[in-house]
């Protein structure tokens, strides 16, 4: 039997492949449309917990239209910062759809950041006002930065209201946003990054639930993306929303069974249903809309297949025998 080798890509090599955020958004739109048509296989995450408040989860998916199949093994450990380690880690295995043989093993941190930002932007494309200019970011770490990058591609952003309890995190975010030509205002309190904003992203640590955002903060006509599950939001504030969406219903139901999202309004649609035109997105200027995208493995696979293709073209990585 011929020797089979798998391509190994480090986090630096994944980034060096040069896949753009615009390309990730385009790939995700295909994946979510296919999902709405029932042509994607994606079981809910399988999760284990070795420490309180921490998790490691297995996320498999197959998107035939993109020839993308594989699994991400991802962890989130809030206490890692005290050890000088990243809070979120991940390893992704991409397989050959015809043989099942592993094609590549790659770091999943860059992919997780990019596909999460892309999913927010794709939701906002259908749920936010197209003339949205002011974005509020609560939580200015990796996800706050990637979401800003993605939203800045699809919307004519001019100003960012940024809130983070860490001055160092806020300073780094401000410098990066300013490099994108955006005016950054450092919010002294959370409300300043919600009230008056066209787009809002809550990207802070998801637990414990602190319910910082109160009723009346999210303006008429605004869109919000919840990356922190429902930690930032008081139930009454969520109930003010006209359209509440998610990326995957079985996964949302799984998290509700775990105690999350108990106070949300009725779910209007999935992102795929809206992207495929099966259900309407924004219909009036005054609608308040929310996307609670928990994280879909099909988005990881849609991004990974782009990274793999570009990495092979550029000769990145190293081949390891199985």
Image (cartoon, helix red, strand yellow):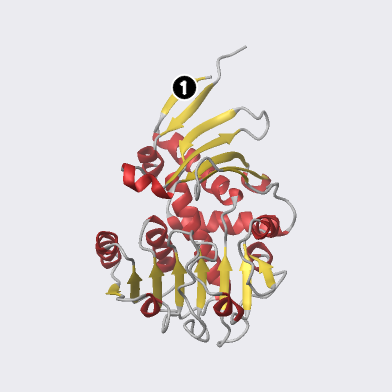
Say above or below: 286 vs 127.
below
Residue 154 visible in the shown view:
no
Q: Position of residue 52 (x, y in %)?
A: 50, 47
The residue shown at (67%, 28%) is 99
Identify the image quadrant of residue 245.
bottom right
Q: Secondary structure at mark 1?
A: strand
Residue linked to disc 1: 320
15 horizontally vs 91: left or right: left
Query: Nearest the camera: 247 or 5?
Result: 247
Q: How many numbered discs, if any?
A: 1
Residue 82 location (% of width, % of height)? 32, 46
Residue 178, quarter of the rendered image: bottom left
Residue pictured at 44% horizontal, 58% vertical: 205
Q: Residue at x 39, y 79 (%)?
A: 191
Give percent across and percent down for residue 283. 63, 83
Q: Quadrant of the N terminus?
A: top right
Considering every residue shown, the one lying at the far right of the view is 38
Q: Count neighbours of disc 1 (C-alpha within 10 A) and say few if under 14, some if 14 to 19, many if 20 or more.
A: few
Residue depicted at 67% across the width and 55% down the height: 254
For residue 20, say whether it is visible: yes
| Outermost residue toward the top in this view | 1
Which residue occupies the foreground of this view, 198 or 283? Answer: 198
Horizontal side, residue 39 vs residue 66: left or right: right
Task: Report x, y in % for residue 17.
Answer: 40, 42
């Amino acid at each position: 039997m011929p020797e089979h080798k798998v391509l190994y890509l480090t986090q630096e090599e994944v980034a060096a492949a040069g896949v753009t955020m615009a390309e990730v958004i385009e790939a995700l739109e295909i994946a979510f449309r296919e999902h709405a048509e029932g042509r994607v296989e994606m079981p809910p995450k399988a999760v284990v917990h070795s420490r309180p408040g921490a998790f490691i989860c297995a996320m498999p998916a197959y998107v035939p239209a993109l020839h993308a199949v594989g699994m991400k093994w991802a962890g989130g450990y809030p206490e890692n910062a005290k050890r000088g380690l990243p809070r979120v880690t991940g390893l992704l295995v991409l397989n050959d759809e015809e043989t099942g043989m592993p094609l590549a093993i790659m770091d999943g941190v860059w992919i997780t950041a990019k596909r999460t930002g892309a999913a927010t932007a794709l939701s906002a494309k259908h749920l936010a006002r197209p003339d949205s200019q002011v974005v509020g970011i609560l939580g200015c770490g990796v996800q706050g930065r990637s979401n800003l990058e993605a939203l800045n591609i699809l919307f004519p952003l001019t100003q960012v209201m940024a809130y983070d309890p860490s001055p160092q995190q806020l300073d780094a975010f401000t410098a990066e946003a300013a490099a994108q030509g955006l005016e950054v205002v450092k919010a002294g309190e959370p409300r300043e990054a919600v009230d008056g904003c066209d787009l809002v992203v809550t990207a802070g640590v998801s637990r414990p639930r602190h319910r910082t955002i109160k009723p009346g903060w999210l303006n008429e006509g605004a869109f919000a993306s919840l990356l922190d599950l429902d930690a930032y939001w008081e139930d009454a504030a969520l109930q003010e929303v006209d359209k509440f969406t998610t990326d995957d219903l079985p996964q949302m139901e799984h998290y509700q069974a775990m105690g999350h999202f108990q106070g949300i309004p009725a779910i209007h649609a999935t992102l795929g249903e809206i992207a495929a035109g099966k259900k309407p997105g924004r219909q009036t200027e005054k609608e308040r809309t929310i996307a609670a995208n928990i994280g879909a493995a099909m988005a990881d696979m849609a991004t990974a297949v782009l990274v793999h293709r570009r990495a092979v073209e550029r000769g990145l990585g190293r081949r390891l025998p199985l």
